[in-house]
Amino acid sequence: MPENSTLLTEYGWNATLSETFDALLVNSPDTEPGRVIRVDRGQCDIAVATGTVRALSGSNSLCTGDWVAVSKVTRANTTPANTTPVNTTSETETPSVTSILPRSSSIVRSAASGKSEGQILAANVDTVVITTASDGDVDLGRIERLLALAWESGATPVVALTKTDAAPDISAVLAEVSAVAPGATVLAVSAETSEGMDILDAVLDGTVAILGPSGAGKSTLANALLGDTAASCVLETGRVRAGDGKGRHTTVTRELIPFSGGRTLIDTPGLRGVGMWNAGEGIDKTFPEIEELISACRFSDCAHNSEPGCAVVGALERGDIDERRLRSYRKLQRENAWNAARSDARLQAERTREIKVLSRRIKDHYRGRRQ
């Protein structure tokens, strides 16, 4: 444990993390522990025991929420907590991240760029708040997607129906969303009137990540949760567009902020695309009623589409399961399988290229010996 661990404790540092750090870096006296606050273009802001330091990220996989080992720097390289790091001059080199501690959880979606790889949205998250505005059309399919990501990450999902003060019939919306979120806490809240905010605050634990589309009120909700504990970190908010009710992207980076009760909060940019990535278990937890039917189906190789005697088809015909839910389940499963196949193809292509390069080097080696 660092001598002055007060700041790190605010960001979630504990005895278990200290033991992990010491075990992994027993022979690295020139490093110290820290937590990634924000990542930006190959550099990142990291909270260390003495303040906040700007460092080289050292890895494309680094993300907000990561616990890392960072090369030690003098006090001239650091800034006090809750202030923006500034460029300083000192005799030491620019600090850098030397390793990433094992993650307890990570929220991963398929890369927005379309590449056959996953994109980590946040690491070491304990609670995922899935936001959706209740004053308009509620996209149940999007909620199911975000629930699958949350369950797969290992964090606990909470669905927050925001802007309830402007909702025409919040009780109907609450019932509708609760039906598609079995096992998750679903709450109706308003950051404007504080309705339900005390209950939401009570169910949040550890590191909290807020997910949802632009216009769902994520930053407004985050500011209400932060209260007076992080006045210097108030997040920018914006109104939705009058034409289509969609939000503008006011949050452009993922930033980790400490708040009451030794917790931390990550506000994320609005998610336009929420692709599945190795989310099989998360999908199963999102649709437990369908998974239960599949496990009881008499055919082990059943496609659950039109086979006679299929438990899923039978339940659909009887009205025991919702047709929209089944379509959503099938869509997410197909998407997850397709992305997995693309990833396997990419890895196979990389292995093939490596083999070709190695083969070419061997041939060149023996050709040189003969000459």
Image (cartoon, rainbow, N blue to C red):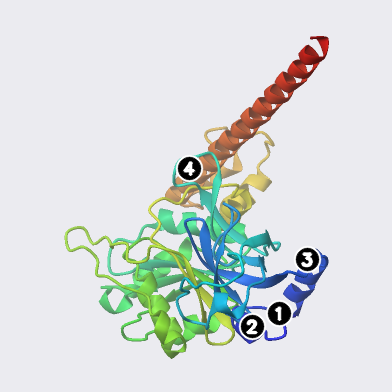
Q: Label 4, secondary structure: give it.
A: helix
For residue 196, say whether it is visible.
no
- How many angstroms separate mark 1 from mark 3 (CA)? 20 Å
> Which three-letter amino acid code belongs to the residue tagged 2?
Thr
Q: Nearer the viewer, residue 325 or 69?
A: 69
Q: Position of residue 84 (x, y in %)?
A: 45, 76
- How many angstroms separate mark 4 from mark 3 (CA)? 48 Å
Residue 331 - label: 4
- How many angstroms separate mark 1 from mark 4 (CA)? 41 Å
Residue 28 - label: 3
> Which three-letter amino acid code belongs to the residue tagged 3?
Ser
Q: Left or right? Give the position of 234 relative to 127.
A: left
Q: Label 2, secondary structure: give it.
A: helix
Q: Quadrant of residue 288?
A: bottom right
Q: Label 3, secondary structure: give it.
A: loop
Residue that mark 1 sits on: 14
Residue 9 - label: 2
> Which three-letter amino acid code belongs to the residue tagged 4?
Lys
